[in-house]
Structure formats: C-alpha cells, structure tokens
Amino acid sequence: MPLGLILSSIGRSMRRKRTSSLNILSSKRAPRDYYKGKNCKPTGFHTRKGGYVMVDAKLPRFVVPDLTDFKLRNYSKFSQEELMFQI
C-alpha cells in the first residue's frame, strides 16, 4: 500500500465529529418549518377554513374517587405555629 493511503486512513479515523450533531434537535437548530411540539395528544382536528374542531372521544377522561368520608388529613401544614406546638 502506498504511504498516502495509509496516512489518509489514519487521518480519517482521528477526525473529530461535530459536537452540533450530538445536541438535541430543537426548533432553534432546525429548518424554518420544523415543529417538534410538546408531546401532547391532539384533541381534535383543523378545518380547511382555519378553524379547529374538538372531538369528544379524544378529550382526556379523569377518574376521581369519592373522598367525602376520607379519614386522612392533608400532608403539609399551612401555618408554622401549629407545627411548633406539636413538637
């Protein structure tokens, strides 16, 4: 093998990679039309005329138990005086 091919292969292996390729891609570092979003699920769809239609099946449903006869109290005290008397 000629000496030039050996030196060029060593130089290629020792070349550093760009640190910008290791960064997280955001809308500031991307092309103008790039939109990453915030990992939220869509609750509807856009219409042709620029409106937005909410779909009831896509809305989140939260199941909350009935806590009327719940015997435990809140965890944190709002006033410090009550806390000082208990010590």
Image: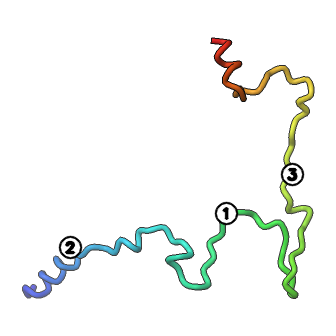
Mark number displayed over residue 39: 1
Q: Can you give x and y, in whole percent of width and height, for residue 29 in the image? A: 50, 77
Alpha-carbon distance for marks 2 and 1?
38 Å
Would you say the residues marked 2 and 1 are in contact, meaning their CB atoms lie under 8 Å apart?
A: no
Q: Which residue is mark 2?
A: 14
Mark number displayed over residue 61: 3
Q: Residue at x 92, y 63 (%)?
A: 56
Name which quarter of the figure residue 74 lies in: top right
Dot 3: what SS? loop
Is residue 6 depicted above or below 36 in this figure? below
Q: Nearer the viewer, residue 46 or 8?
A: 46
Q: Can you give x and y, in whole percent of width and height, for residue 51 in the image? A: 87, 80
Name which quarter of the figure residue 82 lies in: top right
Label 2 neighbour load within 10 Å: few <14, some 14-19, many 20+: few
Q: Residue at x 92, y 28 (%)?
A: 68
Dot placed on the residue nearer the N-terminal end, 3 or 2: 2
Which of labels 3 and 2 is toward the front?
Answer: 3
Is residue 63 depicted above or below 55 in this figure? above
Q: Can you give x and y, in whole percent of width and height, for residue 22 in the image? A: 41, 68
The type of residue carrying mark 1 is Asn
**How has the structure been colored for display?**
rainbow
Q: Residue at x 16, y 77 (%)?
A: 10
Alpha-carbon distance for marks 3 and 1?
18 Å
Q: Is residue 73 left or right of residue 51?
A: left
Alpha-carbon distance for marks 3 and 2?
55 Å
The type of residue carrying mark 3 is Arg
